[in-house]
Image: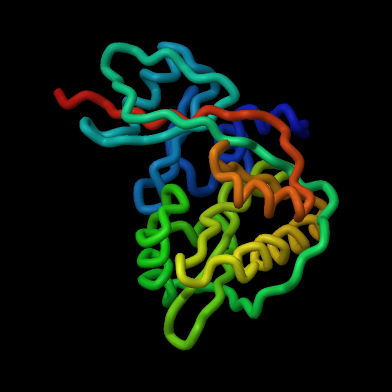
Amino acid sequence: MVGEEALDNPYWHAMTGPHARVAIGTGKARRYPAHIGPVAALAEPSEEAFADLERLVEPGETVGFVRAEPAALPARWSRVFGVALEQRVCRRLGPWRAAESTPLTEEDIPAMLALAEATEPGPFERGALALGDFLGVWEGSRLVAMAGVRAHLEGFREITAVCTVPDRRGRGLAKGLVGQLCSDILASGEVPFLHVRTDNAAAIHAYRQLGFELRAVMQVQAIQLATR
């Protein structure tokens, strides 16, 4: 049984818990396969953990991890970028208006990739559906908004890839998708959480309205393994 402190290192607890079925790695490092996403996790930011991670990453490949505190990097690793994220949890859902959404499937992957490329909601690869359900809003043959579920650790599910095409923003489409996902997660007895950039004021405002409370400020580190 894990407690809320597991959210200090959410992907480690996901990849050694409910997502152990898809994660790869042993010892003190795990990662999702590259076709699912460039997300890695360390049990602790130690030399031993980075050595375990090195066996999972190709030279020149970039992976990212999220922790409550940034990690000092061993010599063979370099920092590509870092950013602070608010981690928010929703224990009681606020008012929301449902969007006219449909579940997204493997057939929709090209449209999902195109939307992610146009809006840059964070890492998104074609294997994302292996981790959780996604919902989308279509206008004809055009996917204009989506949101889905990524990390699953005991008692918690992460909402991710929340995005809307620029010319359809301000209509509450993504907010409605997040509301539906939150409703489903809470009904299952688990708690939704998400990460949002600390400078994304519009998204933070919408999440507050939905009932997401600030839990912590997390650090994302994207790191690259040196070529040999």
Residue 58, placed above or below residue 99: above
Residue 129, placed above or below residue 11: below
Q: Residue at x 60, y 56 (%)?
A: 149
Decide if residue 85 is on the left or right side of residue 186: left
Quadrant in which the N terminus is drawn: top right
Q: Residue furthest right?
A: 92
Q: Is residue 191 visible?
A: no
Residue 54 position within the rendered picture, expressed as x and y whole percent measured from the top left: 32, 25
Q: Residue furthest left?
A: 228
Residue 36 position within the rendered picture, expressed as x and y whole percent measured from the top left: 42, 52
Q: Nearer the viewer, residue 168 or 184?
A: 168
Q: Residue at x 14, y 23 (%)?
A: 228
What is the image's colouring? rainbow
Residue 166, placed above or below residue 27: below
Q: Nearer the viewer, residue 172 or 30?
A: 172
Q: Can you tell which quarter of the image residue 182 is in?
A: bottom right
Residue 130 position within the rendered picture, expressed as x and y whole percent measured from the top left: 50, 58
Residue 209, placed above or below residue 105: above
Q: Residue at x 77, y 31 (%)?
A: 3
Q: Residue at x 60, y 40 (%)?
A: 14
Q: Can you tell which quarter of the image residue 59 is in?
A: top left
Residue 146 position within the rendered picture, expressed as x and y whole percent measured from the top left: 54, 66
Q: Nearer the viewer, residue 206 or 163?
A: 206
Q: Is residue 29 visible?
A: yes
Q: How many marks?
A: 0
Q: Can you tell which quarter of the image residue 73 is in?
A: top left
